Structure formats: C-alpha cells, structure tokens
Image (spheres, rainbow, N blue to C red):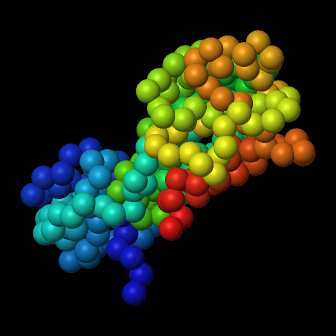
C-alpha cells in the first residue's frame, strides 16, 4: 500500500482549507476527490490525517481525524550553508538532497568568488523544492531556505552550534575528526570558486574548523551533499 499523499498548509483546523499550488496539485494532478485520506503538514513536526469533505473550484476542505508527531526528523540539529551556484539545477539538487538527509536548516550565501546572483523568484523556487523533497521522504517539516548576501552573515547565522565545519580545498589536513563529532553541527561549503584564504581565516576566528575532503577537488554540489551525508552518518542518523 502506498503512503498517503502529503500537503503543506499554513494553519491546521478541525476543517482545514487546502488552496493555491497544493490544491491545484491535489485536484488536477493527483485527482484527489471527496472521501480520500491524506496527510496535512504545518511545519510544526506533526502529521495530521485528514479526509477530503468537499472539493470546490479553488479550494478543498478537509476534516482532520487524527494528529501524530512525525518520527522521521533528525535527532540532531544540522545546518548546511552553501555558496550559491551558477546552475539553478545544482542549487536545487543540493537543497533536495540535504532535506532528504535530514538537515533542518539550509542557508545559501554569496561570497568573494561567487558569480551567481539570487533573487526572490529563485529563493521561492528553492523553498518549493525543499517542500517537495520533504513530502517525498515523508518528513513532517521542510526547512525554510534563507539567503545571506555575505559569507559573514551566513557564518554568523550558525552561532551556538557545537560543531562548525568549514570545507576548505587548500587545507592540508582536517582540524576536526568527522567520525567523532557529537551534537549540533553546522556545515559550510563554497560555490564553484571556493573560498579565499582571507575568508577561510575569518571563519576560523568565528569558531569554524577546516576540513579537507580528500585528495581530489570535488564539484561544489558533490562536496555539499557528500559532506552532509558523512556528518549525518557520524551523528548516528543512518542507524
């Protein structure tokens, strides 16, 4: 039996309204009608089982019948901060995989060697990708994608994390052992141009520890996803 279809809504009530893009997808793509059972999500970490009671021209009414706490969220708080890339598909790929891996905070930033530019439409698209990925992997929450127009702002957003990991392509050795980390973890990966030495040193003054990702230079999207996967494994999220 396939999993119930999942939809994000702003507010959960005994009778909840599904509208906008989620409604259009439910009605016109999935052909969901009266009597169908679905899961509603409000990003609180809870899952609400609901039954479609009425389908109108621009909205759908659903009666909530059961409330449960989602059990697929990561036990440990993990944040991924990555440099915005020129190729939109690659940014979406990173967001999609980070959500699937269990990251609960994602930030995108511009830095010294960045050559791509963010706008409201691109940010909206990344947030849509995050929601779709969360539904696909049965998470109860979808991280909100934040944009920082400077690396400094992105780095400061992770104050308070137990581990601060900074992927540095010119580091000769790692300053932190990834297989021994415990507690909340922030991961920073650069864009296609990487980081300047000044940026790398500035990160160290903010408590970040450099890590090397091996002998080979990885593409930015490979580095972001693979480092995130290693961190989640080390934190016990694959057990």
Which residue corresponds to the image point at 35% horizontal and 74% vertical from the top-left?
4
Q: Quadrant of residue 34?
A: bottom left
Residue located farthest toward the left when viewing the structure as drawn: 14
| Depth check, front residue: 6 or 202 | 202
On screen, residue 137 above or below 214 = below
Q: Tell me the residue at 63%/51% (across/down).
A: 179
Q: Position of residue 189 (x, y in %)?
A: 69, 34
Q: Position of residue 170 (x, y in %)?
A: 85, 29
Picture coordinates of residue 38 (x, y %)?
A: 29, 69
User: For this rendering, which residue is in front, 94 or 123?
Assistant: 94
80 horizontally vs 201: left or right? left
Q: Residue at x 29, y 52 (%)?
A: 45
The answer to whether one can see residue 98 in this image is yes
When the figure is inspected, residue 9 is found, relative to residue 163, above or below; the finding is: below
Is 51 placed left or right of 94 in the picture?
A: left
**Is the residue 204 above or below the residue 56 in the image?**
above
Say whether residue 41 is left or right of residue 159.
left
């Amino acid at each position: 039996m396939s999993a119930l279809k999942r939809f994000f809504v702003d507010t959960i009530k005994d009778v909840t309204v599904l509208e906008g893009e989620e409604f259009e997808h439910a009605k016109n793509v999935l052909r969901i009608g009266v009597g169908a059972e679905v899961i509603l999500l409000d990003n609180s970490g809870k899952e609400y089982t609901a039954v479609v009671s009425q389908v109108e021209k621009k909205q759908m009414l659903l009666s909530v019948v059961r409330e449960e706490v989602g059990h697929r969220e990561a036990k440990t708080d993990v944040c991924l901060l990555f440099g915005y890339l020129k190729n939109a598909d690659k940014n979406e790929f990173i967001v999609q995989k980070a959500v699937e891996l269990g990251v609960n905070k994602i930030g995108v930033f511009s830095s010294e060697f960045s050559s791509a530019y963010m706008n409201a439409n691109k940010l909206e698209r990344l947030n849509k990708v995050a929601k779709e990925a969360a539904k696909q992997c049965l998470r109860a929450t979808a991280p909100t994608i934040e944009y920082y127009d400077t690396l400094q702002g992105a780095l400061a957003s992770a104050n308070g994390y137990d581990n601060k990991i900074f992927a540095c392509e010119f580091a000769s050795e790692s300053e932190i052992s990834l297989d021994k980390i415990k507690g909340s973890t922030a991961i920073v990966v650069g864009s296609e141009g990487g980081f300047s030495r000044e940026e790398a040193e500035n990160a160290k003054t903010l408590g970040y520890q450099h890590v090397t990702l091996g002998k080979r230079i990885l593409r930015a999207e490979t580095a972001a996803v693979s480092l995130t996967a290693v961190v989640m494994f080390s934190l016990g999220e694959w057990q």
